[in-house]
Amino acid sequence: KILRSIENKRIYHLGGRRSIPMNSRVIAATNQDPELLMEEGVFRKDLFYRINVARVHIPPLRDRKEDIPQLTKYAVSKLNKKFGCEYENISEGSLECLYRYNWPGNVRELFNCIEASIINMYPSRTRFIEIPNKIRNQLKLEVTDRHQERCDIITALMETKWNKSKAAKKLNW
């Protein structure tokens, strides 16, 4: 029914006999590759061909960290209106912390981080938002864990003379 509605630009009320014209556009987003999903038989080909008219690829935030200052500024202005605050932007120290994080939750995770920071602050004390220590420590732990994992892998490879199978067993993989 969705495919028919997209194709014909008409819908039917539940139990209705007459079609109702609609003037609409479908905007869809995904974090997976639809072509691969079609090959695996998970995504319907006919639906893909109906909605794949104009395609815009936006890389994840971890691949475009230069956008973080603009995104934080936007989020701060949006949240200022929502909470009635008057913060200018995020502090330089907090911005450095945001650059080091990998952002697996993408832009939504960044916005949630900034919102959590605003909620936990007193509006009259400062002009700039500081990332709370709890979140700051979580961001640092993520970076530290990845660095430690890399060190463990290299150490295991060196101890096994770069034998990948033995190194994997040594790491219990």
Image: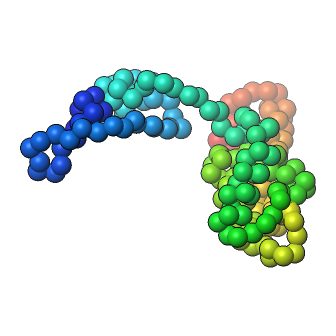
Left or right, 18 with respect to 128, comes to left
| Residue at x-position 64% and y-position 66% | 82
x and y, in percent, of residue 153 in the image = 78, 38
Q: How is the image coloured?
A: rainbow
Any part of residue 170 in sight: no
User: Can you name the residue that lies furthest to the left here?
Assistant: 17
| Residue at x-position 85% and y-position 52% | 95
Against 118, residue 167 (above or below) is above
Left or right, 30 with respect to 125, comes to left
Left or right, 52 with respect to 153, comes to left
x and y, in percent, of residue 129 in the image = 82, 63
As rendered, which of 62 and 153 lies closer to the eye? 62
x and y, in percent, of residue 68 in the image = 77, 44
Against 43, residue 12 (above or below) is below
| Residue at x-position 77% and y-position 44% | 70
Any part of residue 34 in sight: yes
As rendered, which of 39 and 147 lies closer to the eye? 39
Among the 4 quarters of the image, the one containing residue 59? top right
| Residue at x-position 75% and y-position 51% | 72
- Quadrant assignment for the C terminus: top right
x and y, in percent, of residue 114 in the image = 73, 59
Figure disc tally: 0
User: Can you name the residue that lies furthest to the right here?
Assistant: 93
As rendered, which of 68 and 34 lies closer to the eye? 68
Against 23, residue 88 (above or below) is below
As rendered, which of 170 and 141 lies closer to the eye? 141
- Quadrant assignment for the N terminus: top left
Left or right, 45 with respect to 65, comes to left
